[in-house]
Image: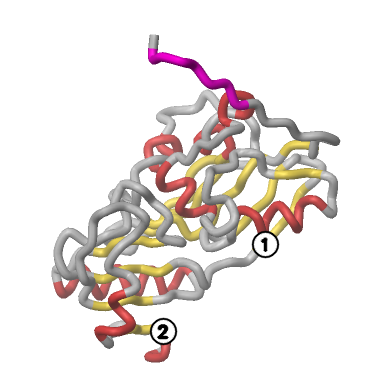
Amino acid sequence: MLKINRSRVLTERSELYTYSYDASVRANMPQMVVRPINRDEVRSTIKFAASKKLPVIPRGAGTSLTGASVPLRPGIILDMTLMNRVKEIDLQNSLVVVEPGVVYDELNKILAKKGVYFPSEPGSGKVCTVGGMAATNATGIRAIKYGPMRDYVLAAEIVMANGEVLRLGSKARTSSSAYNLRGLFIGSEGTLGVFTELTLRIVPKPTHFSTVRISFSSME
């Protein structure tokens, strides 16, 4: 049985339509949408889906250009946007612990008050979620200087397809122990598990920003 408040389970066609597409050209209607507010509800949904043999598609803001959050066949879309708490800001260790539904720009508004920021900015930064950024290994115009999302995820809590919870990584900046399983999940687009918590590296906020665009008359 699905253990989640009925008001956060969407089944009406008019409600499902808005989840049938993302920023790509792909579209397909889900069977239902579940909007969890904590890890236990994510686990409950995944276990329910497994019992019914339904696919689960995690979704953030739906800004992907690749169809990553569009179901290939009817299943359950897991809308993670209600899990949007900033749980901890640790300035001493230069990290922040967040839930996956936190919007990139909103996170940086909070961090700016502390003189720090999270630099891996994609083009959809005003609306995209950090969980979606981790799932797609997002990059952006600052990636040449700061690197992709993978460089900023120190630790992650993940719910697997059987409902098991994994905790990968730590607050340490570097580690040489065993396999880099954390890196395996970054960029996997929700195919290996669902992020329910992320520990992200943050950096001092620069006093000035500058973006340069260079145009060429030919590809050569």
Q: Residues within 10 Å of mark 1 (few under 14, many from 20)?
A: few
Q: Amino acid at mark 1?
A: Lys
Where residue 35 appears, x then y in whole percent? Answer: 42, 76
Residue 23, located in which quarter of the rendered image?
A: bottom left
From the viewer's perspective, tell me whether residue 202 is left or right of residue 63.
right
Question: With respect to residue 14, does 42 lie above or below?
Answer: above
Where residue 60 appears, x then y in whole percent? Answer: 44, 61
Q: Amino acid at mark 2?
A: Arg
**Residue that numbered label 2 is attached to:** 8
**Residue that numbered label 1 is attached to:** 87
Dominant secondary structure (helix, strand or loop) of the stretch shown in magenta: loop
Q: Secondary structure at mark 1?
A: strand
Residue 170, located in which quarter of the rendered image?
A: top right
Magenta stretch bounds: 213-219
Disc 2/disc 1 C-alpha distance (Å): 23 Å
Where residue 88 appears, x then y in whole percent? Answer: 71, 57
Q: Residue at x 26, y 71 (%)?
A: 76
Q: How many marks?
A: 2
The quarter of the picture where the C terminus appears is top left
Question: With respect to residue 145, does 109 lie above or below?
Answer: below
Q: Is residue 127 magenta?
A: no
Of mark 2 and mark 1, the one earlier in the sequence is 2
Q: Secondary structure at mark 2?
A: helix
Question: With respect to residue 66, does 206 lie above or below?
Answer: above
Where residue 65 appears, x then y in whole percent? Answer: 36, 48
Please state which of the two labelled residues, at mark 2 or mark 1, is closer to the viewer.
2
Q: Residue at x 49, y 54 (%)?
A: 131
